[in-house]
Amino acid sequence: MKHYLAIDPGREKCGLAVLRDDGAVVERQRCDTNALEAAVSDLLVKHEFAGCLVGDGTGSAPVRERIEKLLQKSNNCDMITIDEASTTEQARALYWEANPPRGWRKWLPVSLLVPPEPVDDWAAVVMARRWLKKS
């Protein structure tokens, strides 16, 4: 079974997700953009990746440059740029699927709720699954 690393880049924070080729999430995390190399290096030690999927949105170019260097040093997997349009909205839906609202919030449509934490890691999951469906 192949594993893929997905990165939702941002100016201040990035979302990271490791997925199997069947779309199952192996792990997710968020990290400060300044600590991206350390977070990706840790994942490269734990997993062998068939590809690294990076979103094309905010902060993408510098993130791609930094990650490309790491990939060349380690396992040399391909980097693929992914369209990240509408991933935040889909990431919010995934968040609420994994963490159903409780109390009075369960009566509201999840489209009206804002998750209590950033969903960058879930956005990385959305991007990876989108790409895996097309592949």
Image: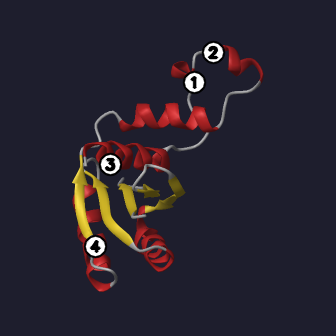
Distance between mark 4 and mark 1 Cα atoms = 38 Å
Left or right, 122 with reference to 62: right
The residue positioned 67% from the left and 30% from the top of the image is: 100
- Residue 13, position as x, y percentages in the image: 44, 56
**SS class, disc 2:** loop
Measured Cα–Cα span from mark 2 to mark 3 = 32 Å
Residue at position x 30%, y 85% in the image: 73
Residue 108 is tagged as 2
Q: CA distance from mark 1 to mark 2?
A: 7 Å
Give yes or no for contact between labels 2 and 3 (Cβ–Cβ under 8 Å): no
According to the image, label 3 marks what residue?
132
From this viewpoint, which residue is outermost toward the bottom? 73
- The residue wearing badge 1 is 113
Question: How many tags in the picture?
Answer: 4
53 vs 116, nearest the viewer: 53
Tag shown at residue 125: none
Q: Amino acid at mark 3?
A: Leu
